[in-house]
Image: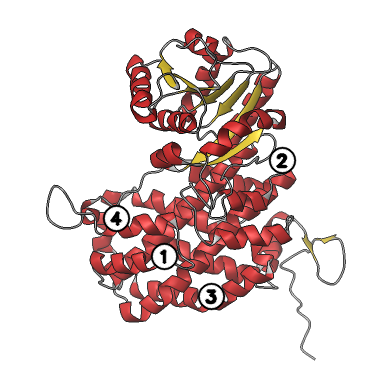
């Protein structure tokens, strides 16, 4: 290690850690890297020398003591390790740190774990920040979206390091900002991942509806998705979908996509979002449907059997659908973002995070997996209504949804009639219709609950809680 102090240390030199470390160094920070695997530590040093063209700007080590001594004070350490080993990594790291030092957990930690760690480290005088990082391997190297939260006192120390390394939105703003206290940073990243599940499922359902149901080939679908790269559907996920559709199979003829087993994996962050929504009483049905759809896809062998046992149609009208799918997709994506924002707003109330919703929309505009042109509307909406619980209450967004809802209905109906499962689109439509219903059938549910459990109910015409002795019929003769 060099004797002059480094500005920041990166613990964990896997793909994300090494790339983010090199990104920080590319923007002028002197970066010390640590990994217990000497090959990764040496590989980081070699990559830095090759890519940065300035010896000593970023150096890796496999010795934790040497690493910690090389850092300036207060020491700033960015951890990028798997969620399951964060506590053990902290246990080792703490021994080499002093009061006033700053630890940033840049992995996908669950927000309750972040809050627990913050309390423990705060007792030792250490500042702890939970920071969501989105953008994948390429984003980490060239500019991710970053969502830090925790102890606000530490933000001024890390801000000059993070802002130059972040992605840049179309207006030149860095895609990193303070998300609030406690576990806010990881909560926002968790919601980001839940929305990511929803958007991926919606895109997959359009693909299925037009390909399996409508008979359109991958080349045709590529041109359709490529046409959406500009306009209201412009987004990272639309861009990569267009590329995926025509990627050739190196091991055979035809598109690679047609050879991939339809069994989706998941690391649990989507499920965390649904669980948090249930805990806070916030409806997130599109996200929930996406999580369940991945789970159902895992029953691959059982689905092969069921496909032979369960009858049903399997066709749609592609000519009719193509005029509708773009509007339906825009509506469903808008509702997915709205559900995520509503959940963050609820966490502000329940946990006191004070997460600025306009800022969340702003830093998601670049670098992250869910970046999309539609987020400009959300950023603008929250600029004028910072405390709005759900952006569908914005007149501008409500008007956009009103112009798209007929497309959403048409696509859901086509899927149902053609036997193509559209769980996320169906959930989006039900969510929209539920919000616009001044009266829902929950009155019957309350009556049922009171009937079998004496849970009481409220009335429309008077205040208070009421219980009825149900089942007593009026047997008086008709008059």
- Tell which circle, 4 or 2, labels the residue nearer the N-terminal end: 4
- Tell which circle, 3 or 4, labels the residue nearer the N-terminal end: 4
For label 3, the SS is: helix
Of the residues tagged 3 and 4, which is closer to the observer? 4
Report the colour scheme. Answer: secondary structure
Q: Which residue has dot 2 on it?
A: 351
Residue 422 drawn at (x, y percent): 41, 65
State how far apart marks 3 and 2 are (Cα). 34 Å
Residue projecting furthest to the right: 463
For residue 155, say whether it is visible: yes
In this view of the protein, which residue sits in the foreground, 76 or 342? 76
Q: Which residue has dot 3 on it?
A: 405
Q: Badges 1 and 4: C-beta atoms under 8 Å apart? A: no
Q: Give residue 376's mark.
A: none
Q: Give residue 422's mark.
A: 1
- Tell which circle, 1 or 3, labels the residue nearer the N-terminal end: 3
- Tell which circle, 2 or 1, labels the residue nearer the N-terminal end: 2
The answer to whether 159 appears left or right of 265 in the picture is right
The answer to whether 50 appears left or right of 83 in the picture is left
For label 4, the SS is: helix
State how far apart marks 2 and 1 are (Cα). 34 Å
- Circle 2 packing at 10 Å, graded few (<14), some (14-19), many (20+), is few
């Amino acid at each position: 290690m060099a004797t002059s102090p480094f500005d920041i240390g990166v613990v964990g030199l896997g793909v994300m850690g090494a790339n983010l470390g090199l990104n920080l160094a590319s923007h002028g920070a002197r970066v010390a890297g640590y990994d217990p695997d000497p090959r990764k530590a040496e590989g980081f040093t070699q990559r830095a020398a090759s890519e940065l063209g300035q010896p000593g700007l970023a150096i890796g080590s496999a010795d934790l003591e040497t690493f910690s001594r090389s850092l300036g004070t207060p020491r700033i350490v960015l951890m990028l390790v798997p969620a399951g080993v964060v506590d053990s990594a902290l246990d080792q790291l703490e021994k080499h740190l002093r009061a006033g030092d700053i630890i940033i957990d840049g992995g996908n930690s669950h927000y309750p774990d972040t809050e627990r760690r913050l309390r423990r480290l705060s007792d030792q005088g250490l500042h702890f920040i939970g920071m969501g990082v989105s953008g994948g391997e390429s984003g980490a190297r060239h500019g991710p979206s970053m969502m830090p939260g925790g102890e606000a006192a530490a933000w001024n120390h890390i801000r000059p390091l993070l802002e130059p390394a972040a992605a840049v939105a179309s207006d030149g703003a860095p895609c990193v900002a303070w998300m609030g206290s406690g576990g806010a940073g990881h909560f926002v990243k968790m919601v980001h991942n839940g929305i990511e599940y929803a958007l991926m499922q919606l895109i997959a359902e359009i693909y299925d509806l037009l390909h399996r149901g409508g008979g359109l080939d991958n080349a045709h679908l590529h041109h359709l998705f490529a046409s959406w790269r500009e306009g209201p559907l412009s987004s990272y996920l639309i861009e990569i979908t267009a590329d995926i559709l025509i990627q050739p199979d190196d091991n055979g003829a035809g598109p690679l996509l047609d050879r991939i087993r339809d069994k989706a994996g998941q690391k649990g962050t989507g499920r965390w979002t649904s669980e948090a929504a249930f805990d806070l009483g916030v409806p997130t049905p599109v996200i929930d449907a996406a999580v369940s759809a991945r789970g159902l896809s895992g029953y691959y062998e059982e689905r092969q059997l069921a496909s032979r046992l369960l009858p049903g149609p399997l066709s749609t009208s592609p000519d009719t659908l193509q005029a509708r799918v773009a509007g339906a997709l825009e509506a469903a994506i808008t509702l997915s973002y709205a559900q995520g924002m509503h959940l963050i707003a609820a966490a502000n109330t329940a946990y006191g995070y004070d997460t600025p919703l306009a800022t969340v929309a702003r830093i998601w505009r670049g670098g992250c997996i869910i970046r999309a042109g539609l987020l400009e509307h959300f950023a603008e909406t929250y600029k004028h209504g910072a405390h709005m619980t759900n952006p569908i209450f914005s007149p501008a967004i409500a008007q956009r949804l009103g112009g798209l809802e007929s497309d959403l209905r048409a696509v859901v109906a086509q899927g149902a009639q053609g036997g193509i499962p559209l769980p996320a689109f169906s959930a989006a439509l039900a969510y929209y219709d539920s919000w616009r219903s001044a009266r829902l059938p929950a009155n019957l549910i309350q009556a049922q609950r009171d009937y079998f459990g004496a849970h009481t109910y409220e009335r429309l015409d008077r205040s208070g809680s009421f219980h009825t002795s149900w089942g007593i019929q009026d047997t008086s003769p008709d008059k």
